[in-house]
Amino acid sequence: MRRIDLKKANVARPNTIRDINRQIILNYVRERGPISRAEIAQETALQRSTVSLIVDELKSGGLIEEVSGESTGGRPPILLSLRTADAVAIGVDLGTIRTLVATSDLAGRVLEQEEFPTDPDAQKTISRIIDSARKLICKNRGTIEGVGVSLPGLVDQETGTAIFIPHFKWRDLEIAEEIRSAVGLAVTADNDANAAALAELWFGRPEIREVRDFIMVLIEEGVGTGIVFDGQVYRGKSGAAGEFGHMTIGQDAPVACAAGSHRCWEAFASERAALARYAKLRRGTSGSNKINFGQLVGLAFGGEREAQSALKETAYYLGLGIANLIQGLSPEAVIVGGPIVRAWPLIVNEIRTAVQNSICRGLPPAHIIASTLGAEPTLMGALSLVLTAKFTPVSLS
């Protein structure tokens, strides 16, 4: 049973139950639509009149719409579905190499997307983000309701401040406030792994949405983790929870982590680590130091043994770190996300074997699966920072 936090608790008002019922009905439409009013009333045990009143409110608010179902001989039934005609959110996926700015509808479907190289100068990158956001806001004529920003570092989600972005050495960057002041919309910023975990929770396939406790392991230039407990992202004080990329798992890694250590999980299991292993195996071969991670995966699928060996050794260390997470947190599932999922058929057995050989006997097993959002879950994570507010019920704690 969750203990109520009296400092943050909202006193129950006369409309609290109605607000909760509203969110329940909206989520039924989101997850099970098209669905009829009668089906919602039956499954929720709400009165038909209550369902109809709330449905009318959601329709007038532009959140749901009526669609015709299939006829079984008579008049086609009237069903309810999310209204997806307009863009409602902008997501900004600020990566170490490139930045994506995209719009999506209420269902999380990406409608339009822009991309540009991330400039090491923070203000230049923020200016490009603001320019792209303004363009998309203008094009959509007032339907955009908010902006979500995914960042590769430590973020205070409550204030939207980037406390530290290791790759660029950015510190105390009030990125959410700068964008909000420029575009005039609410802006939410969070760590990329947290945002990706949120996206899996709300917009992943059913096998993930139904899991209440899981860990997202995001493999990119670095290694990040997002923790979900009881259906909520756990951020810890100032958003610092989940920095498992810097736990010590060995020594003499092929690369240094963002903080300069050769002992961190990130130094053993990141994309950079895999590329360094490949370069060592292909030492003296022209071009071996110039390929990117996507090309490495392509070479591995093409049968090149050195590329396969580099990926499998990286997968071993990825599994070693995952085993530590399972022993410490006992999640139902561990989700691996990022470009590395493109190599999943080549590495999944290495990961699972490393986990099996590293955890203590008797511990509950955890499912280890690839992200259901593809190789770039962080863009969907940025959009989720806006979209999930539409579906989150009122809380008393």
Image (tube, helix red, strand yellow):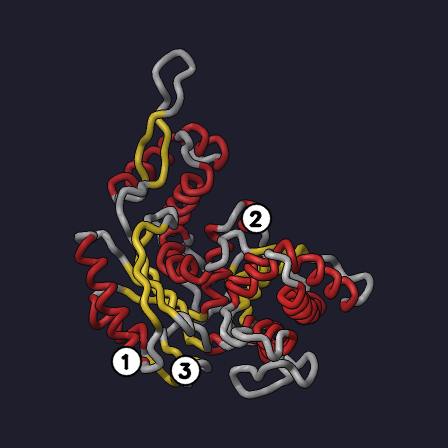
Whichever of labels 2 and 1 marks the residue nearer the N terminus, that label is 1
Instruction: Determine if residue 1 is in view.
Output: no
Q: Which is nearer the N-term, disc 3 or disc 1?
A: 1
Q: Amino acid at mark 1?
A: Gln
**Among the 4 quarters of the image, the one containing residue 279:** bottom right
Q: Residues within 10 Å of mark 1 (few under 14, many from 20)?
A: few
The residue positioned 65% from the left and 82% from the top of the image is: 253
In this rendered view, identify the residue nearer to me: 45 or 245. Answer: 245
Q: Residue 167, can we see it?
A: yes
Residue underneath mark 2:
210
Q: Which residue is mark 3?
A: 168
- Provide the secondary structure element on which disc 2 rests: loop
Sequence-first tag of 3 and 2: 3
Left or right relative to 259: residue 282: right
> Residue 280: x, y in percent?
63, 78
Q: CA distance from mark 3 to mark 2?
A: 37 Å
Count of numbered circles on the image: 3
Q: Is residue 191 left or right of residue 104?
A: right
Q: Is residue 216 left or right of residue 195?
A: right
Q: Which residue is mark 1?
A: 123
